[in-house]
Image (cartoon, grey):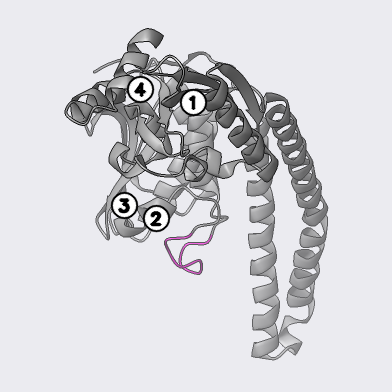
Amino acid sequence: MQNSLYKLLSALQTTAVQPNYRTLFESVPGLLISVTPTLQVAAVSKLFAYTARETAEKLQGQPINEVYPFCHFSQQQVADFNHTIKAVFSTGKSTAVQYKMATTGWSISFSAVADEPTETSYVLLQLEQSAAGTADTDATIARLKEADRIKDEFLVNVAHDLRSPMHIISGYAQIVLSENGDKLTATNRQYLQHITTKAAALGELVSALLAYTKVQAHTPAPALTDMHEVMLNALSTVKEAYPKINPAIEIEKLPAVIGDEELLYQVWYHLLSNAFKFSAGKPAAAIKIGYGMVDDTAAFYIKDNGVGFDTAYMHKLFNPFERLHNEDDFPGSALGLALVRLAIEKQGGKVWAKSQENDYALFCFTLPGAPEQ
C-alpha cells in the first residue's frame, strides 16, 4: 500500500489530475496526512479528517502544527516534530517517533515521498494512537477509584452518625409536646411539630443514602430469579409503609429472569413506593404491574393513575436529589428513582418513563435475557 500512496502523493503535484488523486488519497484507510516542504497540509485521509473533526478541504493548506493532534503538543514536542520532519525532507530517510501526552500517546511514521530521486516532495505522516499514556491513565483511574471508595466510606459514616442525633432531636421534641403541649403557645407547638417532621425527613434521607451507597457498592450476582415473587415481597413492604393508601392493584404474571434478587427487590420497592405516593390523592387510585411490549420493547412496567409529571423535565427524573414535585406535597428523599436506575444499569438493563400530567405515570425497565413477547 505504501508504494501506491507514494504514487498518489506524487500525482498530487500535477494540477490536471490533482483533484482525482486527492479523492483517492482521502479514501485510503488509516490516519494519514501528506505534508509539503513548507510544513502545510497537502491532503488527509477521511479517517484523519473525522478524527480531527474537520473537513478535508478545510485542513488543506493549514500549518501542520495547528492541526490536531499536533496543536496539543508541548513546545518541546513541537520543536522535536519540526526537526524530525525537516530532516526527512532534507535526507529522504524515513523514521518513526513516539510522542507521549498526558492521557494518551501518538506513534507517527514519517515517510519521504519523492517524484525526483534527489528531492522529497512530500512527507507522509501515518499516525497511530499508542499506549504511551496507559500507565498515567491507569494511575489516574486507580486514584479515582480510591477517591470514590473514600467518598463512599465517608457517606456511610456520616449517615450512621446522623441517625442517632436525629432520633434524639425528634424524641425530645415529642416529649415536650406530650408533657407540656398545653402550656405552649400555638406557635411554639407548631415549631416543635416542624422540628419533628424535619427530623423524620432527615432520617429518611439518611436511610436512602445508605441504601444508595449499598447498591453502588454491590456486585451483581445474576441467578435465575422469580421476578413475580420479588415484586410481591416488595409490594408487601410498601403496603406496610403506606397503611392508609389502598389503591386497586392489577397484577399480571411476571416471567422469571436472570438477575440479582437484592437489586431487583430495590427496584420494585422504590417504583411501587412512588406509585402509591403519587396516586394517593386520586379518588380511585389504581396501579397496574406487568410485563409486555412498551415502545416496541419487551419490558417490565408499573403504571399508576396519579399526578404524573411534566415530560419537559424528563432528563432530571432519574438524577439524585432532583424533585419534579413540591416536597411538602410529596415528601421523600428524592433518591428512589436514582437508585432504580443504578440497580438496573448495574445489571446491564435500562429504565425509562412516560407520563401525562394529572393522568398517569408509566415506568419501564428491561434486563438482558428477559423473555421476548
Residue type, label 3: Ala
Closer to the observer: label 1 or label 3? 1
- Marks 1 and 2, how far apart at CA: 22 Å
Closer to the observer: label 3 or label 2? 2
Identify the residue at horizontal 63%, vertical 48% (top origin).
Answer: 208
Question: Could you say which quadrant of the image residue 177 lies in?
Answer: bottom right
Q: Residues within 10 Å of mark 2 (few under 14, many from 20)?
A: many
Q: Are circles 3 and 4 on residues that touch, CB within 8 Å?
A: no
Q: Which residue is mark 1?
A: 230
- Image quadrant where one finds the C terminus: top left
Residue type, label 2: Phe
Depth check: give the residue in front, 366 or 108. 108
In the rendered structure, which disc, 4 or 2, sits on the residue that comes first in sequence?
4
Residue type, label 1: Val
Identify the residue at horizontal 57%, vertical 21% (top origin).
Answer: 91
Residue at the far left: name it.
Answer: 16
Q: Which residue is mark 4?
A: 254
Q: SS at mark 3?
A: loop
The circle on residue 285 is 3
Q: Are circles 4 and 1 on residues that touch, CB within 8 Å?
A: no
- Marks 1 and 3, how far apart at CA: 23 Å
Q: SS at mark 4?
A: loop
In the rendered structure, which disc, 4 or 1, sits on the residue that comes first in sequence?
1
In the rendered structure, which disc, 1 or 2, sits on the residue that comes first in sequence?
1
How far across and down, in percent of the image, does residue 119 sit? 45, 22
Q: Which residue is mark 2?
A: 278
Closer to the observer: label 3 or label 4? 4
> Which span of residues is magenta-colored?
323-331
Name the side, left or right, on which 58 lies relative to 239: left
Identify the residue at horizontal 39%, vertical 17% (top origin).
Answer: 116
